[in-house]
Amino acid sequence: MRQLSLFIPYTDWNDSIRQQVESMDDVLRSMNVRSEIILLSLAADCQDTPTGLAQREGIRRVEIRRPRTYSSALFCGTQVAEGELVIHLPAECSIPDSVLRGVLQQLIQQDLVLVSTSDNQASAVSVVSDWIQRRMGNPARLDVSRLIWGARREALTRLPQIQGLSRGLPLLVGMLGYRVAYCASPVIGGQPNQASPLPDCWSWKDWAGHRWLQQRWTQVDFSEVGASTNILPDLRVAFFEDESRRKAG
């Protein structure tokens, strides 16, 4: 059993992501943690990642062909991951071992830890506003596809299979009774930067009609490169086929 699975979802492979993977591979090896790196490809060209990199020990690549959204990537990554803990990194965002150790330390007492990237002093009004938005899943501002975060994989496996997780992940994890924390980056030893958001579906109707949505499953077309067997072919994720109701994450 591995202790840690590192998720790196991306839409377009480039040299910066390759350097990120190699850097994080070195960090994980130096920490002497039983771990794996899972590359979650949302790229239109599924052959974008160098074959040699994906075949290295401890590095896996999963291709999400349809629908190519962040929620689909998160579901698929959770299903194939072997680690008890999951760390999510935006593409092109490497972190030192001090930050990684800090997130893992927070996960001793928490089930989901989101790393805040803001170093500004918050006013009393903004604190109240942020608290309200967090209680509502922070649909207007928080996009977890852009953040560094860590979680116990158990909490992710129990999530409802719907789209919009880039906005609603903290809310849903909390509703399941798990502990959610927002950790200031200086506390864990670094100041990570926000990345560009990944595509995802989001609509308030996705949540208001949650039970109705259960009737609108669709098959997720994905596979792991180099795997000898198909990965959970019955995995299903609900999403709206009406393009007018989709919004980017």
Image (cartoon, rainbow, N blue to C red):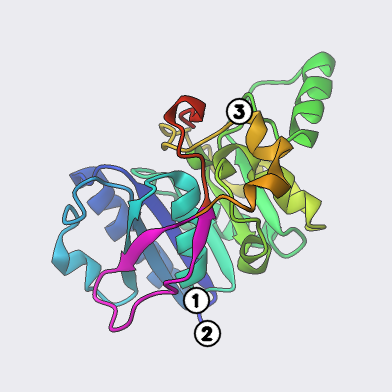
1 and 3 marks in contact (CB < 8 Å): no
Mark 2 burial class by Cα count in 10 Å: few <14, some 14-19, many 20+: few
Q: Is residue 226 above or below residue 49?
A: below
2 and 3 marks in contact (CB < 8 Å): no
Residue 225 on image: x %, y %: 26, 70
Mark 1 lies on a secondary structure that is loop
Q: Name the residue that disc number 2 marks.
A: 1
Mark 3 burial class by Cα count in 10 Å: few <14, some 14-19, many 20+: some
The residue sitting at 47% across, 78% down in the picture is 34
Residue 201 on image: x %, y %: 50, 36
Q: Name the residue that disc number 3 marks.
A: 118
The residue sitting at 69% across, 39% down in the picture is 207
* Magenta stretch in the rendered image: 218-237
Residue 184 seen from this side: no
The residue sitting at 66% across, 32% down in the picture is 205
Residue 93 on image: x %, y %: 39, 44
Counting residues from the start of the chain, the first of labels 2 and 3 encountered is 2
Tell me which corner region of the image, top left, top right, bottom left or bottom right, holds residue 64: bottom left
Counting residues from the start of the chain, the first of labels 1 and 2 encountered is 2
Mark 1 burial class by Cα count in 10 Å: few <14, some 14-19, many 20+: some
Q: Closer to the camera, 89 or 172?
A: 172
Mark 2 lies on a secondary structure that is loop
Residue 1 seen from this side: yes
1 and 2 marks in contact (CB < 8 Å): yes
Q: Is residue 6 above or below residue 137?
A: below
